[in-house]
Amino acid sequence: MRQGLDFGLLGPLTVRRARTVLDPGRRKQRLLLIRLLLADGRAVAPQTLCEELWPQQPGRAPGGAMGSLHAHISKVRAVLEPQHLRRQGTFEVLVTEPLGHALRVPPESRDTVRFERALAQARRFMDQIEDLDTSWDGMRSTITSHAAKHCGS
């Protein structure tokens, strides 16, 4: 996992680096991080993030959302990016691209992906067990039939 990051989305958001729990910040920072994690590495446009994190409310001016977004991006980077890269102004985890912001973390760093993969593997095992059970039923039928022929004579 890049930078040893691990994200728990099943339940309350948890962020770990090398098994050390990190504080992802306040509510909007957590929501931002969750939204970017759910984008699965794809860039999310700043406008989309603003609309989702600060939905329009009657009587409220929309102007401050973009500035707030940039502040929250910076705070989330402070948690996720290695300090030596932050000092250089280089980012490899929470990146800004022409299309927007994206998290560059391996899919398996998210517990949701690990859960889905484990579930798929369990389903494959269940299918194999079902196949074995069907085979056993066929063998049992054959054994019973042979036993009946030989014991009945």
Image (cartoon, rainbow, N blue to C red):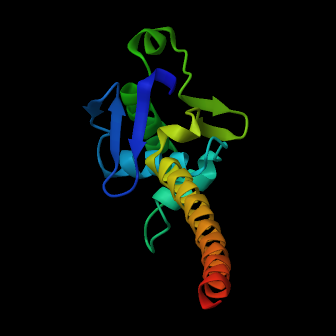
For residue 64, say whether it is visible: no
Q: Tell me the residue at 29%/46% (across/down).
A: 26
Q: Residue furthest bottom?
A: 152
Q: Nearer the viewer, residue 127 or 107?
A: 127
Q: Tell me the residue at 59%/85% (across/down).
A: 151
Percent x, y for residue 22?
A: 28, 33
Q: Nearer the viewer, residue 50 or 92?
A: 92
Q: Tell me the residue at 53%/39% (across/down).
A: 108
* Quarter of the figure with the C terminus: bottom right
Q: Nearer the viewer, residue 36 or 66?
A: 36
Percent x, y for residue 25?
A: 30, 41
For residue 33, say whether it is visible: yes
Above or below for 35 versus 147: above
Q: Residue furthest right?
A: 98
What is the quadrant of residue 77 in the picture?
top left
Q: Tell me the residue at 37%/48% (across/down).
A: 30
Percent x, y for residue 90?
A: 55, 15
